[in-house]
Image (cartoon, grey):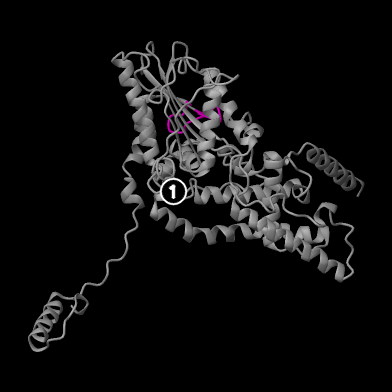
């Protein structure tokens, strides 16, 4: 009995120590801010070999931290009204409110009355601005040329938070490169395609079959999440004495993520949950991302093939310029893109990131992968790592003239750190091997064939029936002076 008591006390002590060191800002899935996680990755141990020089860079980045969207702000207003009702009901039943956190009483959404949302906030601007500075400092050979939009094209989706992210990045990249103002800024171009036809940065918006898949799959994903939400709902009802619903818990978790990432508040909505409950809720978000945006179905990432083709084409052009000794300033040295989690996540999957060798072979054969492991088991697939705010993939093309195996290599950096490409077994892959093992298997899938929704053809009437109808109409014209129309045919 004494041994059991000692074990329980030790377990409680260990839990208290673990909780004390717990920072909820590391567990917010894709709502995690970049500075919190950019240096927490399982990076490859490989380094760039001596004698290799970067000659081109591709960047695919998510927009920075943003405010809640219009829809979500309205939902938070509804949450405030419902929380008020829950407390009123408890008071009418003479229930004790001692366990109810004081902030919940009379809580109003920090975004109430705001008419527009979803914009890049100051923190997001800083994330991209600082990323631009770091990339220029890391690759001085690539950014020594005088700026020209053909040498350093900057592209963004036609969504304001993405284009604002591109501007913030460009300001950091070109800081002190011009003559405008005290910071010596300079003007630069950001180009966008129409949202209706942007199959490179918003392919998910243009892919009809993906929209059909997602709509059909979302109810099943909700079902997978329900047991966790129900378990936590029951715990919160017991803990605080309020009759929370499953929807309340889902919205309180959303509020927690917004408070922690946008407002740096971690002791209100986030404080309602234990560390293990936070880990479970994060897992439900990661599960949804895996199924609807990631490795859960091949259409999620294969619709991103136009982006992959664009990346490879830019590398081939850089190699051609190197081989033909084009004059400096006459060819592209970096292609810089700014978009969304729905862009970065599929692109990471196309590269085979966050997989081991056997899993990579499975996706090549279009076999399903196992779902991400549920806590307390560990997992590679975490939204906070795969696609936090300002999360990014860089593909750096290196010239290695002294290498006997290949003259050109591709290195992948995820959130600025080298990361293993399962298809190559390394983060530093010969260019031809990169094309053969990682790119080529995807290129057999044509975007239009994959994404076009084929509607059922309307039933065709027999030709004989149409001819007899025509003869009747001609006969009526001979025997009737009343005008007729095409609709009679």
Q: Residue 146: image x %, image y %?
A: 44, 16
Q: Quadrant of residue 12?
A: top right
Which residue of the protein is positioned furthest toward the bottom in this rendering? 479
Was residue 419 drawn as part of the magenta stretch in this picture? yes
Left or right: 489 in relation to 364: left
Residue 41 appears in the picture as rendered: no
The crowd level at tag 1 (other Cα within 10 Å; few <14, some 14-19, many 20+) is many
Identified at 76% across, 61% down, the residue is 83
Identified at 89% across, 45% down, the residue is 3
Q: Residue 47: image x %, image y %?
A: 52, 19
Which residue of the protein is positioned furthest toward the right in this rendering? 2
What residue does disc 1 label? 204
Q: Name the residue nearer the viewer: 477 or 158.
A: 477
Q: Residue 178: image x %, image y %?
A: 51, 18
Stretch of the chain drawn in magenta: 413-427
Q: Residue 426: image x %, image y %?
A: 47, 26
């Amino acid at each position: 009995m004494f041994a059991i008591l000692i074990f329980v006390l030790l377990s409680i002590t260990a839990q208290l120590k673990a909780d004390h060191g717990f920072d909820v800002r590391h567990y917010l899935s894709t709502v995690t801010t970049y500075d919190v996680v950019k240096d927490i990755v399982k990076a490859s141990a490989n380094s760039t070999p001596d004698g290799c020089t970067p000659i081109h860079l591709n960047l695919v980045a998510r927009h920075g931290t943003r405010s809640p969207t219009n829809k979500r702000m309205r939902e938070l207003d509804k949450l405030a009204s419902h929380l008020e009702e829950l407390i009123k009901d408890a008071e009418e039943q003479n229930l004790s409110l001692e366990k109810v956190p004081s902030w919940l009483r009379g809580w109003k959404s920090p975004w109430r009355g705001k008419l527009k949302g979803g914009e890049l906030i100051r923190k997001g601007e800083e994330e991209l601005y600082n990323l631009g500075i770091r990339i220029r400092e890391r690759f001085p050979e690539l950014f020594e040329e005088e700026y020209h939009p053909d040498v350093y094209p900057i592209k963004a989706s036609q969504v304001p938070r993405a284009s604002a992210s591109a501007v913030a990045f460009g300001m950091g990249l070109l800081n002190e490169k011009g003559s405008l103002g005290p910071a010596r800024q300079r003007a630069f171009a950001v180009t966008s395609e129409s949202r209706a036809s942007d199959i490179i940065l918003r392919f998910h918006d243009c892919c009809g079959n993906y929209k059909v898949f997602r709509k059909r799959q979302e109810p099943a994903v909700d079902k997978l999440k329900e047991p966790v939400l129900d378990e936590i709902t029951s715990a919160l009802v017991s803990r605080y004495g309020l009759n929370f619903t499953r929807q309340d818990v889902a919205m309180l978790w959303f509020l927690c993520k917004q408070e922690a990432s946008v407002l740096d508040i971690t002791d209100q909505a986030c404080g309602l949950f234990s560390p293990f409950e936070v880990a479970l809720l994060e897992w439900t978000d990661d599960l949804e991302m895996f199924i609807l945006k990631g490795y859960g179905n091949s259409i999620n990432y294969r619709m991103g093939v136009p982006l992959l083709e664009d990346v490879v084409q830019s590398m081939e052009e850089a190699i051609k310029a190197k081989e033909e000794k084009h004059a400096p300033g006459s060819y592209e040295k970096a292609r810089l893109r700014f978009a969304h989690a729905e862009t970065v996540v599929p692109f990471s999957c196309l590269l085979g990131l966050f997989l081991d060798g056997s899993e990579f072979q499975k996706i090549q054969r279009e076999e399903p992968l196992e779902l991400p492991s549920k806590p307390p088991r560990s997992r590679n697939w975490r939204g906070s790592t795969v696609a936090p705010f300002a999360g990014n993939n860089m593909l750096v093309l290196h010239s290695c003239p002294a290498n006997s195996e290949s003259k050109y290599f591709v290195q992948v950096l995820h959130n600025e750190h080298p990361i293993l490409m399962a298809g190559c077994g390394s983060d530093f892959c010969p260019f031809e091997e990169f094309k053969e093992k990682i790119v080529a298997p995807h290129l057999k899938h044509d975007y239009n064939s994959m994404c076009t929704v084929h509607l059922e053809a309307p039933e065709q009437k027999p030709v004989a029936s149409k001819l007899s109808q025509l003869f009747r109409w001609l006969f009526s014209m001979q025997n009737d002076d009343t005008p007729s129309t095409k609709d009679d045919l």
